[in-house]
Image (cartoon, rainbow, N blue to C red):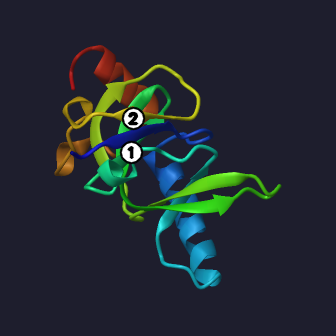
Amino acid sequence: MTMHLQKLSVGSESIQTLQDWQTHVVERRKAKGLSAHAQHVTRMTPKQKEALLDGGSIYWVIKGLIICRNEIVDLEATQTNDGRKACAIIMTPKLIPVIPTPRRAFQGWRYLKPEDAPLDLQGPSSGEDLPPELRSKLVNLGAW
């Protein structure tokens, strides 16, 4: 059964700032001779690896809303700069906008069941270009 992750995108102001960061990460990986995938390193390795690799995504929380996702490609054992064990979540470099869904702050990542995952936004009414404050107000008003 597929499982997803949800993660706070610390420092991101919008989908575009997250995309800019992930583009930088992809370029860094390519310069090292690695695949052209986005990557996020976390201290804890998810125990449900098979479920995550069975079509799972990482849903990004920006300014209190889940607003986009990356498809998960692999989970790789790695190390932090100070030599501690870590996990690299390898993702497709394309961010997919989703219906904005409120989320309270949390530390690390959390599992997200498929039935609780927001649906993808498609077409010109996706709201991708809306300022984060306006998007948040629309969600709070129930207009999304």
Which residue is labeled 1 in the image?
48
User: Disc 2, disc 1: CB below 8 Å?
Assistant: yes
The disc labelled 1 sits on which kind of residue?
A: Gln
Front residue (pair 13, 78)? 78
Residue 140, position as x, y percentages in the image = 32, 15
Task: Classify mark 2: residues with Cα within 10 Å, few (<14), some (14-19) or many (20+).
Answer: some
Occupied quadrant, residue 31: bottom right
Task: Classify mark 1: residues with Cα within 10 Å, few (<14), some (14-19) or many (20+).
Answer: few
The disc labelled 2 sits on which kind of residue?
A: Tyr
The quadrant of the picture occupied by the N terminus is: top left
Residue 90, position as x, y percentages in the image = 47, 62
Res. 129 visible in picture: no
Residue found 48% across the figure and 38% down from its top = 7
The quadrant of the picture occupied by the C terminus is: top left
Q: Is residue 26 above or below residue 116?
A: below
Callout in the foreground (2, 1): 1
Left/right of residue 94 with respect to residue 123 in the rendered view: right
Residue at the far right: name it: 82
Residue found 59% across the figure and 85% down from its top = 33
Real-space Cα separation, disc 2 to disc 1, in angstroms = 9 Å
Q: What label sits on residue 111 in the rendered view?
A: 2
Q: Is residue 125 above or below residue 33?
A: above
Q: What label sits on residue 16 in the rendered view?
A: none
Left/right of residue 104 with respect to residue 31 in the rendered view: left
Left/right of residue 18 with respect to residue 68 in the rendered view: right
Residue found 51% across the figure and 51% down from its top = 18
Q: Judging from the image, what secondary structure is the residue with disc 1 in?
A: loop
Front residue (pair 38, 138)? 38
Q: Judging from the image, what secondary structure is the residue with disc 2 in?
A: strand
Occupied quadrant, residue 73: bottom left
